[in-house]
Every structure is written in C-alpha cells, then in structure tokens.
Image (spheres, grey):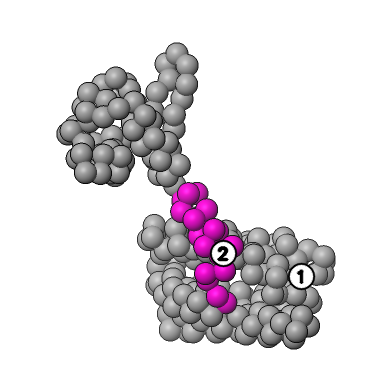
Amino acid sequence: MFRTASQNRVFQDVVNQIQEAILEGKLETGDILPSERELKEMFNISRGTLREALRVLEQKGLIEIKLGVGGGSVVKALNTEKISESLALLIRTQKVSLNHLAEFREGIEGIITAQAAERAKKTDIQVLKELLEEARACIEMGSSHRDTFIDIDKQIHLTLAKITGNPIYQFLMYSVHENIHRYYDRYLSMEERELNENYQDLCDIVNAVEQGHVDEACLLAQNHVHRFNRYMKNRARQQQKGTS
C-alpha cells in the first residue's frame, strides 16, 4: 500500500501517503493501520518521524490513536468538525470581515435556497414549518429567548442546505453557521424588531420554497443576509465611535 518515503520531505510524504490512502478508500473507517514496526519498514523512516506523522493525521481528524492492548492507529469517519475548527480560528484572528462573510453568504445561500425551491418534498416543507413554529414561540416569549431563536434560525438554514442533496453545500452551511454566532454576539442586538424581521424573512423564504418560486426564494435569501449584515456594520461603526 505504501512506498519508501521521499527522503527530501520524509515527514510530509508519510502524511500525504496515508492521507491519500484514506481519501481514495484504500483504508476505510474502522481499519487499523499496520503496526509501528511495519510502517517504519514500509516507509524506511525512524520511529520519531512516524509518530510525528501519525500525530498530524490525528490532528486532521483522519485517524484515532488508541493505546494499550488491541490499540493502534484507527481510521476515523470523515466529518466537518476539524474544518469547522479551522474556520473558527480564521474568524478569531479577524481575517474574515463582515463584508467577506456577507459576500459569501449572499451568493451561496441564494443558490442553496433556489435549489431547495426546486427540490423540496412535502416532508421537507413539513420540517421547515415545524421549525418556523418553534421560532414563532420564541418570538412570543421575547428577546430573552434570542439564543434559542438563533439556533432555530441555524437549523432552518441547514435544512435548506440538506434539501439540495449536495453534501458540499451542507458542509459549507454547517461550517459557517457553527461559527457565525461570534459576529452575532458582538454586532447584532436581536431585540424585538430584529427578531420579528428575521422571523418574517424566514416565513417568506419557506413560503417561496414551498411554492417552488426559485427566483423569489433566491432573492429573499440574499436580501435577508444583506439587511442583517447592514445592521451589524452599523453597530460596528457605533462601537468604533464609542471607543474613539
């Protein structure tokens, strides 16, 4: 399965070979990599280099290193957690501005909502309407339920992505909405007016999806993102004035 590691970039070559074997399906979820001794011989590397490579693969979420009898390096199921963590770090280092986020979301969420309008089944609409009912209940209980409302809002966006049937859209929406709360906490008040506007937007979007109005669904999603980005930018400017 593996060849002797390139001596110019030994450590990285080991990581790349094992990673490719996992991504190409040569190693499947639950498979155990050969023992350290066998891997050392296959790659013709030292124990230290091998262990460093395995640690990197574990950090990437590709394997899990189990110790003790019956242990070893076990291939993990691929998921979005590690990439979501990377996006969170990108956000924390302030490399992603409000404009960057809005520009991305307007494009991708417009496409996703349009495709959801084309592909939604009755069962999908039922799920969306049940989420809207939960959102409405939060509205009636007031801004003290802001966090619960935001979580329901996230579930609606993730459901729209799921309706497309495209796992890339699902991953992108998961990664964005798992980390976007950092912007909401800092720049979005979400008092009664904003909550009601957000809820009405969601109702309009779900209605357009149910009716199969593709262009309208796309535009509603884009306008929704645009308006709330404007609110956050206004608050950011106010905060800057307050500190200047």
Residue beneath the point at 42% across and 63% down: 169
Relative side of 207 to 56, left or right: right
Please say if the residues under marks 1 and 2 sit with CB atoms less than 8 Å apart. no
- Amino acid type at circle 2 is Thr
Residue beneath the point at 38% across and 60% down: 168
- Quadrant showing the C terminus: bottom right
The CA span between labels 1 and 2 is 33 Å
Relative side of 146 to 29, left or right: right
Numbered label attached to residue 93: 2
Q: Callout 1: few (<14), some (14-19), or many (20+) C-alpha neighbours within 10 Å? A: some
Q: Based on the displayed image, in which of its 4 quarters is residue 213 positioned? A: bottom left
SS class, disc 2: loop
**Measured from the top left, where is residue 2 in percent x and y?**
20, 33
**Measured from the top left, where is residue 75 in percent x and y?**
37, 33
Segment colored magenta? 80-98
Q: Is residue 31 above or below residue 61?
A: above
Residue beneath the point at 48% across and 79% down: 103
- Quadrant showing the N terminus: top left
Q: Is residue 116 above or below residue 232?
A: above
Q: Is residue 47 visible?
A: yes
Tell me the chief SS of the magenta region.
helix
Q: Callout 2: few (<14), some (14-19), or many (20+) C-alpha neighbours within 10 Å? A: few
**The residue positioned farthest toward the front in the image shown:** 8
Which residue is disc 1 drawn over?
A: 139
- Viewer-side residue, 59 vs 77: 59
